[in-house]
Amino acid sequence: MPPVIVQIKRLANGQNLPLPMRMTEHAAGFDIAAAVEAPTVLLPGEIKLIACGFALAVPAGFEAQVRPRSGLSSKHGVTMINAPGTIDADYRGEVHVPLINHSKVPFTIERGMRIAQMLILPVPDVSLQEVTELDETARGNRGFGHTGN
């Protein structure tokens, strides 16, 4: 499979910060750094939109998915409020990450701290077709908790 080229533009508030990068050879995601100008406190239960200092040109037929970093979630209770977030192929603005603090103590976001990870994934060409009936399955319309767990 040929590599997918995603153009990335460093913004003024992203100067001297690393652009998104894979931290290991086989990492699926590119870690994203916070482009805060000063340490930013995230109080318990608080949500803040954190600037990342770059913009992307995701190719048509792809999306950028932004996901939480497991270390922030498991060690500090800090995660994304809309996980995963989607960056569409036609968006050209600055990438931001909406973080929430689920812990009971304030959490400080420092400039350059890795706050999320981004994956570039294909989006199939899908069209929706309205019908009057759907095909039957063994599960049918049983929803949340239908297996008893």
Image (spheres, rainbow, N blue to C red):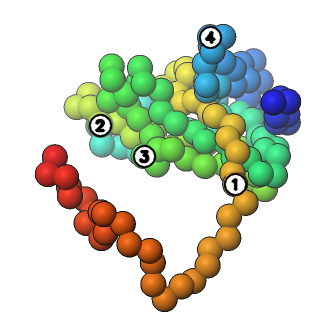
Q: Position of residue 70 (x, y in %)?
A: 42, 24
Q: Which residue is identified by label 2? A: 102
The answer for how far apart the CA atoms under marks 3 and 4 are is 26 Å
Q: Point out the frontmost of discs 4 and 2.
A: 4
Q: Position of residue 148 (x, y in %)?
A: 14, 51
Q: Earlier in the sequence, mark 4 or mark 2?
A: 4
SS for tag 4? loop
Q: Which residue is identified by label 1? A: 124
Residue at coordinates 20% horizontally, 58% vertically from top-left?
146
Q: Earlier in the sequence, mark 3 or mark 1?
A: 3
Q: Tell me the amino acid under the disc marked 3.
A: Ile
Q: Position of residue 83 (x, y in %)?
A: 47, 44
Q: Position of residue 5 (x, y in %)?
A: 85, 34
Residue at coordinates 66% horizontally, 18% vertically from top-left?
22
SS for tag 1? loop
Q: Say whether residue 95 is visible.
A: no
SS for tag 3? loop
